[in-house]
Image (tube, rainbow, N blue to C red):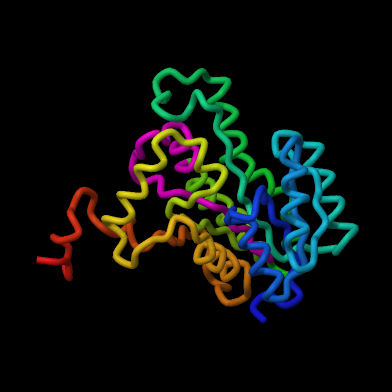
Amino acid sequence: MLLDGKRLLITGVLDPRSIAFFTAQIAQEQGAQLVLTGFGRGMRLTERAAKRLAEPPDVLELDVQQPEHIAAAVEDVQQRWGALDGLVHAIGFAPASTLGGGFLDAPWEDVATALHVSTYSYTALGAAFADLLAVDGGSVVGLDFDAQVAWPGYDWMGVAKAGLEAANRYLARDLGPRGIRSNLVSAGPLHTMAARSIDGFGDFDAVWQERAPLGWDLRDPAPVARTVCALLSDWLPATTGEIVHVDGGVHAIGAGVPAEHQPGGSD
């Protein structure tokens, strides 16, 4: 199996519709051992989702804004396994003031929260777990949303994702000599709990229906989760610092060009 015997820490599992949950489910099917993380009021949701997996994994409390939580998670994994093969960063949060047209007005305190949770935590977790990931050569995989353009309503989360993409490159540079890979999966829009907090998210449906050469199902996180699992496996040993797009091909198609005018489109 693709992940037979791999020891994985997966963050961001909130409900069974999330990319992180599908990743956990597929990883288990492919032979991985799992630990999930949650925190605060979301902890109960994570524990409930964990029970829906074939082998319900333990759930650790991990608020990435609390250094002591990160240290405790590292200690738990050290005592549990003595090493870590893969870390999935599926964490993102931006206060309401930073989304939905609030780009010019959002206060720094809220912007700082978005950047801390959605960007800085990727490096913080990678650095904290580096010794455990380096034991057998591990993989860090984060979830991205294409930051090449300014999306309606995405505002400071778009900036946070652009920072995440840069952080991924630097993490790949600094952890690569220890045999640790760092990659992002840039997913197309999906009807997840996080997406519901973005004003105007419904507009993405029309864009993807119009522009995705392969088509796109906003209710199916499985293609994204499979790609995450591939990056966690040993099948891509020389890939790092990369952004793998799983969006039906939208990132490759010129903006604003109707489908009928694309090569192979209808006349």
Q: How many tags in the picture?
A: 0
Residue 263, how many percent across, how many down? 16, 67
251 relative to 30, above or below:
above
Residue 231 on the magenta segment: no
Q: Is residue 214 left or right of residue 92?
A: left
| Extreme-bottom residue of the structure | 1
210 relative to 201, above or below:
below
Residue 231, how many percent across, how many down? 57, 67
Residue sitting at 58 percent across and 56 percent down? 19
111 relative to 264, above or below:
above
In the rendered image, which quarter is residue 135 located in? bottom right
Q: Nearer the viewer, residue 68 or 214?
A: 214
* Residue 135 in view here: no
In the rendered image, which quarter is residue 177 located in? bottom right
Residue sitting at 80 percent across and 52 percent down? 59
Q: Is residue 168 left or right of residue 87?
A: left
Dividing the image into 4 quarters, which one contains the N terminus? bottom right
Residue sitting at 45 percent across and 49 percent down? 145
The magenta-colored residue range is 138-162
Residue sitting at 75 percent across and 68 percent down? 54
| Extreme-left residue of the structure | 267
Residue 267, how many percent across, how many down? 9, 66
In the rendered image, which quarter is residue 105 located in? top left
* Residue 149 in view here: yes
Residue 235, how many percent across, how many down? 58, 77
